[in-house]
C-alpha cells in the first residue's frame, strides 16, 4: 500500500503568516486534513505530522516521514508578502530534488492551475528544512497568499475542488489512479460528491428559502449570502428575532443565535451542516446533530482558534458564516 505523509505547516504558538483573524496554521490544517481524508478513500495510507493545533519542530516532521519509509511527502502552506498584490500558487522542491519529486511537483502544480488560480507561479527549488531533510520525494505547496483577498476567496470558494485535485494528483504520483470525490476506487460516473453536495445545498436553499441561486455546485459569495439569509429566516420563525433578512451576519444576527449541540434537530442544524460542508468539514446533511456533526464542529473550532467544545453557538456561527 502506498504511503503519503501529509504535513500541515506551522501550528501551536507558530501561527505562520497572519491576515487579521486569519492564521496560516489553520488554513494549512484544513486543507491538509481534507486532502488526507480523500487519499484514504483512495486506499492510500496517510500519515499526518499533526491533526490538531500543536507545534511540531521541522526536523520532527522529516523524522516522521523518514522513520516510516514513505512514498511521498507534501507540506501545506499559505504564502505571504509585504506587497498585498502578490498572488498565486507555487510548489517548491529541494535544490537537488530527484526527478520523481520534480514530476510530482509539476503534476500537482498543473492540477491546481486546472482548477483555477489567480496566477501560476510554477515549480521552484528551495533549500528548506522539510525538503532537505526528508528522504522521500518531498514538496511544499504554497496555496495562495494569505494577505491577498482574492487568493483567500479562491481558497474558500474552491476548497473542495482544490482538495480533490491535490489528492488525485498525489495519488497518481504514487501509482494509484482514483477519483477521491467519488469515494475512491478507479473513478466512476456518479460525479464529484463534493460538487453534488453543494448542488444539493443550493437546491434546498432555493426550494426552502427562495434563494434564486444558480445550481452549479460552486460555493461562492451568493451561496454564502443565501445561507445567512436562511439562518436569519429560521431565527425569525423560531425565536421571533426580528432580523433583517439581508444575508449579512452582523451583531444582531450573532446575538440571536441559540446553541446547538449533539441531539439537536431541525433546519438550524441543517444550516450548520451546510456551513461546515462549505468550509470543507464533511458531515451529513440530515438536520440531526449526531456524533459525526459533533466531531466536525470540534474540528472546525480547533482549526479556527475557537473553544473546541462541540457546541455550535454564536462565536462558531460567526466564523462559519464568514
Image: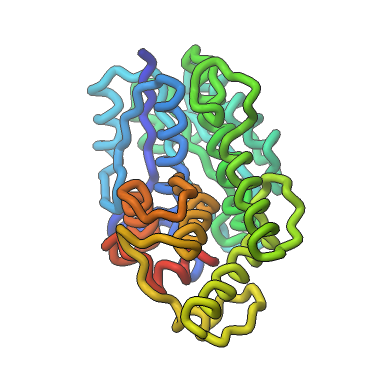
Where is residue 12, by image quadrant?
Answer: bottom left
Q: Determine whether 33 is above or below 249 in the image.
A: above
Please state the horizontal and vertical placement of residue 185, each as a whole percent of the image. 50, 17
Query: Where is the C terminus found, in terms of image quarters?
Result: bottom right
Residue 200 visible, this angle: yes
Residue at 41 percent across and 31 percent down: it is: 131
Residue at 40 percent across and 47 percent down: it is: 29
How is this picture coloured?
A: rainbow
Please state the horizontal and vertical placement of residue 195, each as a whole percent of the image. 62, 40
Please state the horizontal and vertical placement of residue 167, each as a whole percent of the image. 51, 30
Residue at 67 percent across and 61 percent down: it is: 221
Residue at 35 percent across and 63 percent down: it is: 305
Please state the horizontal and vertical placement of residue 74, each as a whole percent of the image. 43, 32
Depth check: give the residue in front, 15 or 112. Answer: 112
Q: How many marks?
A: 0
| Horizontal arrangement in the rendering, residue 266 relative to residue 250 (left or right) | left
Q: Determine whether 104 is above or below 19 in the image.
A: above
Query: Where is the N terminus found, in terms of image quarters?
Result: top left
Depth check: give the residue in front, 240 or 56. Answer: 240
Residue 87 visible, this angle: no
Amino acid at each position: 500500500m502506498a504511503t503519503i505523509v501529509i504535513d500541515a505547516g506551522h501550528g501551536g504558538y507558530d501561527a505562520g503568516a497572519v491576515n487579521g483573524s486569519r492564521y496560516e496554521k489553520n488554513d494549512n490544517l484544513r486543507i491538509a486534513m481534507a486532502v488526507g481524508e480523500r487519499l484514504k478513500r483512495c486506499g492510500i495510507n496517510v500519515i499526518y505530522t499533526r491533526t490538531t493545533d500543536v507545534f511540531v519542530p521541522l526536523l520532527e516532521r522529516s523524522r516522521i516521514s523518514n522513520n516510516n519509509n514513505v512514498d511521498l511527502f507534501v507540506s501545506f502552506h499559505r504564502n505571504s508578502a509585504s506587497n498585498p498584490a502578490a498572488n498565486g500558487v507555487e510548489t517548491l522542491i529541494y535544490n537537488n530534488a530527484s526527478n520523481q519529486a520534480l514530476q510530482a511537483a509539476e503534476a500537482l502544480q498543473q492540477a491546481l492551475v486546472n482548477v483555477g488560480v489567480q496566477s501560476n507561479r510554477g515549480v521552484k527549488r528551495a533549500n528548506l528544512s522539510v525538503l532537505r531533510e526528508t528522504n522521500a520525494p518531498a514538496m511544499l505547496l504554497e496555496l495562495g497568499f494569505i494577505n491577498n483577498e482574492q487568493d483567500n476567496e479562491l481558497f474558500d470558494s474552491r476548497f473542495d475542488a482544490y482538495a480533490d485535485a491535490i489528492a488525485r494528483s498525489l495519488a497518481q504520483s504514487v501509482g494509484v489512479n482514483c477519483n477521491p470525490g467519488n469515494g475512491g476506487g478507479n473513478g466512476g460516473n456518479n460525479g464529484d460528491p463534493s460538487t453534488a453536495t453543494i448542488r444539493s445545498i443550493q437546491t434546498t436553499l432555493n426550494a426552502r428559502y427562495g434563494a434564486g441561486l444558480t445550481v452549479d455546485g460552486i460555493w461562492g459569495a451568493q451561496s454564502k449570502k443565501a445561507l445567512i439569509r436562511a439562518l436569519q429566516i429560521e431565527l425569525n420563525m423560531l425565536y421571533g428575532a426580528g432580523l433583517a433578512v439581508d444575508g449579512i451576519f452582523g451583531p444582531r444576527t450573532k446575538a440571536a443565535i441559540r446553541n446547538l449541540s449533539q441531539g439537536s434537530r431541525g433546519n438550524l442544524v441543517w444550516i450548520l451542516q451546510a456551513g461546515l460542508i462549505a468550509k470543507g468539514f464533511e458531515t451529513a446533511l440530515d438536520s440531526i446533530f449526531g456524533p459525526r456533526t459533533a466531531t466536525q464542529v470540534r474540528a472546525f473550532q480547533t482549526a479556527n482558534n475557537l473553544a473546541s467544545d462541540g457546541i455550535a453557538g454564536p462565536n462558531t456561527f460567526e466564523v462559519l458564516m464568514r
